[in-house]
Image: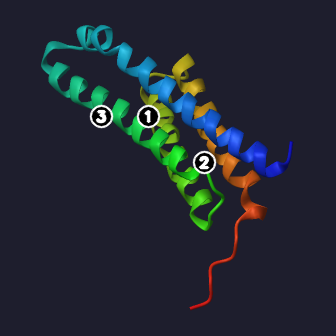
Amino acid sequence: MTKERVATVTAAIGAGLLFATAGFHLSGYSSVVSQTATDLRPLMAAVWVAVGASLIISALLAIAATPLFTVRRRALLAIAALTPISIAAVQIGYLGFLLPTAILLLDAALLLAAGELGRPYQPRPAAV
C-alpha cells in the first residue's frame, strides 16, 4: 500500500470515527441534561447539541478532503482536527480525562496524520 493510499484510508477512518463520536456524544444527551442543575439545563442542552453538530461538520470537512490530494487537503484535515482537540481540552479542564476525551484525541491524531502522510503528494500552487 502506497503512502498516498494510507493517507486516504487514514482520513476516511478519521472521518468515520468523527461521525461515530458525534453519534456517541448525541446519544448521551438525555442522561447528561437530566443530571445538570435545573437552572443550567437549557444552556447544557444547547451546548451539547452544538458540540455534536460541530463534530459532524468536522467529519464532513474530513470527507471533503479525502478523495483527492489537493493543496487544501492538509489544511482541511487540520481544521477538522481542531474541533475534537478543542472539545477534549474543555473536557480535561472541566471534567478531567474521560474515555470520550481519548476518543476525541484519537480522532484528531488520525486526521492530522492523514494530512501529514499526504503532504509530499500535494501539488504546488500554480504561479499567478
Res. 50 mark: 3
Q: Which of 93 and 58 is in front in this view?
A: 58
Label 1 belongs to which residue?
90
Would you say the residues marked 1 and 3 are in contact, meaning their CB atoms lie under 8 Å apart?
no
Is residue 37 found left or right of 4 in the rendered image? left
Q: Earlier in the sequence, mark 1 or mark 3?
A: 3
Q: Could you classify mark 3 by the number of other residues whose Cα lies within 10 Å: few (under 14), some (14-19), or many (20 or more)? A: few
Residue 18 in picture, x, y percent from top left: 52, 32
Q: Earlier in the sequence, mark 3 or mark 2?
A: 3
Task: Give the residue drawn at x 48%, y 39%.
Answer: 59
Q: Which amino acid does label 3 sit on?
A: Ala
Q: Could you classify mark 1 by the number of other residues whose Cα lies within 10 Å: few (under 14), some (14-19), or many (20 or more)? A: some
Q: Which of 122 and 111 is in front in this view?
A: 122
Is residue 5 found left or right of 103 in the rendered image? right
Question: Could you tell me which quadrant the C terminus lies in?
Answer: bottom right
Label 2 belongs to which residue?
66
Residue 20 in picture, x, y percent from top left: 50, 23
